[in-house]
Every structure is written in structure tokens, then in C-alpha cells.
Image: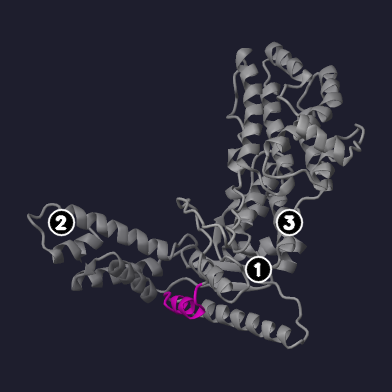
Amino acid sequence: MKGTMTAGEVHKQYNEIVTAFRKLIPDPALRLTFSRQVDGYMRQYALGVWQADNASAITPRHVEFYNAVYSAGNPVPSALYWEVATGVAGFDLFQPPAFFQDLLRYDRMKGTTLARRFADQLTLVLLLLAAVDDVVSESEAGFVNSCNDTLLHLCDQEGLRADRPPLKADDFIARRPVPPPSPAQPQREEPAEKKEEGPATERPKLEELLAELDGLCGLDKVKSDVKSLINLVKVRRLREEAGLPVPPMSLHLVFMGNPGTGKTTVARLLAKIYQAIGVLSTGQLVEVDRSGLVAGFVGQTALKTQEAVQKAVGGVLFIDEAYALAGTDSANDFGHEAIEVLLKNMEDHRKDLIVIVAGYTDRMERFIHANPGLESRFNKYFFFEDYDAAQLMDIFVSMCRKNGYALSGEGEGLARRELEELYRNRDENFGNAREVRNLFEKAVARQADRVAQLDGPTREQLMELLPQDIKP
């Protein structure tokens, strides 16, 4: 498997982490001691991380990562393969670096939190190195956490209080795919693991998916755009088979529109449609927003974004309110780092990953034009219009039907008037289908309060929504 991070990028991130921590050390002598010792210890701990990962052998890429661990002003290592492999095999137990005792003493005298901050930085570095094979395994995360726990225990022994929760490696674990069993070996059934939106086990039929798309309320222009896109992909494939030239085409998409207009629903369908026509291998949808990609420490955002991408490979990565990634020019904001990681992965996985970014129309236009890399990869726009009053009513009726409720004649009239007023008075915060769901859920709650007072309610009474349920 081709690595998604180069040794040069590892060095850059490592140097940023070390430099950021070095700037936190006020004492010049302690700062010098840290600078001289840190690289050697970090390379030693890299051997421990890789030893913990029993599932993978040492590769030349491990050697490249090992030699990338040096900070500005320090010698560049030039270890050979046998040195790294021998070091991994011979790693014994984690021992805190010598300068850590100096950090503890300084914290005790000055009331600072340098030792605990270093424990966080160590976790970031080790996670960076654990990703040499693009996966942070449970065993690697366990080793990283044990190192962190050792350092924090020393802080506790010194009575040094924490000013923030410790950084843990568990959030970065990515399970390796289990290889299929050989024909001679029967497959053992394993309990199903809960997933946000697991990869489809069977390729869905295109006709069924298109029928589901057509069944969505409204969205006529979006439906037409989706079908045109499918036709374009089909014809490109036919041209390839006929030996005709096929110009490059990006399948990444921009969904523009207000909340509640069906963007996530269409993205989920589109992921399955792409799988049905052979563009994607698994067709899952992984939905994230800024908080699912961006972290608060130097170097952590790249790992967090990489984890989201790894889950989405084979399907669609759907980024809601994507404009929030470029919402500030602050040097301390890591949204731009997430964008760079995304752009690189869109290139590395261009044959089996589609990214859909979504949000308000005006903000998404500014977001795409804020970065030339985004402009070149996102050149197809789907616009999701607000539902009109009649469509909002159709959605309300559909919710009633799916959930076993029925509107009385007067209840239906009142619901229609309520939705017409909602649509007429809408502003930039109008939630479209979300407004309908709110109305429906409140009606169900009021109906439950009313029916609970009845003595032996009939089936019809349990189902019926009256005007007083719609609006008290």
C-alpha cells in the first residue's frame, strides 16, 4: 500500500511539535538540555511503538520515518535498515527521558505544567510515527497510552496538578481490514461491529437507487444533475472501452443550500449509486464536520483528518459546513492543515474516494475560491433549493404515514396553514425539513399527552392527530 505521508512531511510535523514545546520552556538551560536530548529519546520510543505493532514487519519506510526524527539544529540521523530492525527487536521498556526530571523540578518550583505538556507532545509524536503504515493499531495505541500514563504518574507523585485532560491515543485507532478466508478454510462468524455507516456488503441495483432518488420530495434540479452525472460516467467508461480519449474529470462535488434540504440524504444515495456503477468499491458514507477533522494541538489535525479519510476510502467523505475549515486567517487555526491533508488524499485515492463538501451557498462559494487546490478539484455544484409550502406539507404527511399517524381533516388543514406561515416568514435560519420534523415531533408529544387521558383508546385514536395536537 502506498503511504499517504512522506518522510519529509513527518520531519516537518515532528519539528513543529518539538519547536512548539521548546518555546514553552522559559529557562534557557533547561531549554538547551531538552533540545540536545529530545531527538534521541523520540527515536528510541519510535522503536517501541513499532515493536508493539506485531502485525507489521519493519520496512524501508520505517527507516525513512526513523531518520526523519530530528529537530532544527540537531544532527540528521542516517540509520540503516538492519539498525532499525535490530533496535525494534531489542526494545525493552519505556523509560522517561532524563530531562523529564528537570521538567518536574521546574514545575514544582515555578508552578508551571511543562511535564504534563510534554506528555501530550510525546503522545502526538508517537501517534505520528505509529502511522508509518497509515494505521494506528490498538497495540500501538496501548503502548502510547502506557508511555503517557508513566509520565503522568510521575507528575502525580510530585503533586503537580493538571490544567487540562490528558491526550489519549484511543481516538486514533483504526482497525485493519480482515483478509478474506482462503477457499479451503471456512469463514468463522464474528459478531457484527457497530459502525456509523458501514460499507455495503452487496452491490445495490442502480434502478432501485434511482427509484429511491425519484421518491425524494422536491429536489427536481438535483435529481436531474445526479442523472446527468451518472450518464457522463457511463459514457466515459464506454469511450475507454472503445479506445477513445477521455478527458480528466473530477467527481468531487459541492452541495450548496440551506439546512434541511436533503444534502446528506442525497450524498448517501450518491455513494451507493457510485458503487452500483463501479466508481467506488464499497459505497459507504462517512459524515464529518470541522470538529471531526480539526484538533487543538500541532500535528494532531493531520492524524485526525487522516483517520476520517481512511474510514471513507472506497466511499464518500461528506463534510458538512465545510466553509468552517477556512473561516479564519489565524496562525493558530488548524483548519488549513486539514484542507491540505484532504487535498493530498483526494489525489492519492483519486480512484476510490469521493469528497462532497456542503454548506450555505454564499459561504461555500467563498470557501472553494479561497484555495486554488479546492477550485481545481471541486468544479461540480449541486444547488439545493428551499422546499416550498406544498413540499413541506408532503414531507409532514410522509412522516405521519411512516410513523403510523393519520391527520384528521381539520388537523391536516391546520398543519398546512402552519407550514405555509413558516415558509412565508422564513429567514436565513430556516431549517426546511428540520422545521417539519420539529412540528411533527411536538404534535406527537401533545397527542401522547391527550391520548394518555383516554380510557381504553381505540386504534384510530392512537393514530389520529387533531388540531389541538398540531397547535395548542
Identify the disc placed on residue 30: none
Q: Quadrant of residue 407?
A: bottom left
Left or right of residue 9: residue 429: left
Q: Position of residue 277 (x, y in %)?
A: 59, 77
Q: CA distance from mark 2 to mark 3?
A: 61 Å
Q: Which residue is located at x 66 percent, y 72 percent?
A: 251
Q: Give the residue at mark 3.
A: 1
Residue 228 in view here: yes
Q: CA distance from mark 1 to mark 3?
A: 23 Å
Indicate the colouring scheme.
one colour
Rendered position, 149 above or below 160 = below
Above or below: residue 378 compared with residue 140: below
Label 2 is placed on what type of residue? Val
Classified by dominant secondary structure, the portion drawn in magenta counts as helix
Residue 371 found in image quarter: bottom right
| Quadrant in which the C terminus is drawn | bottom left
Q: Which residues are magenta?
A: 204-217
Label 1: element kind: loop
Does the magenta run of residues contain 262?
Answer: no
Q: The N terminus lies in which quarter of the figure? A: bottom right
Q: Residue at x 63, y 43 (%)?
A: 137
Mark 2 and mark 1 residues within 8 Å of each other at the beta carbon: no
Q: Which amino acid is tagged 3?
A: Met
**Direction from residue 200 to residue 419 in the image, left or right:** left
> Percent position (x, y) of residue 263?
51, 66
Determine whether the residue tagged by mark 3 lies in a helix, strand or loop. loop
Residue beneath disc 1: 252
Report the residue marked by disc 2.
Answer: 451
Give amino acid for label 1: His
Near mark 3 (Cα within 10 A), the count class, few <14, some 14-19 or many ≥20, is few
Q: Residue at x 83, y 28 (%)?
A: 40
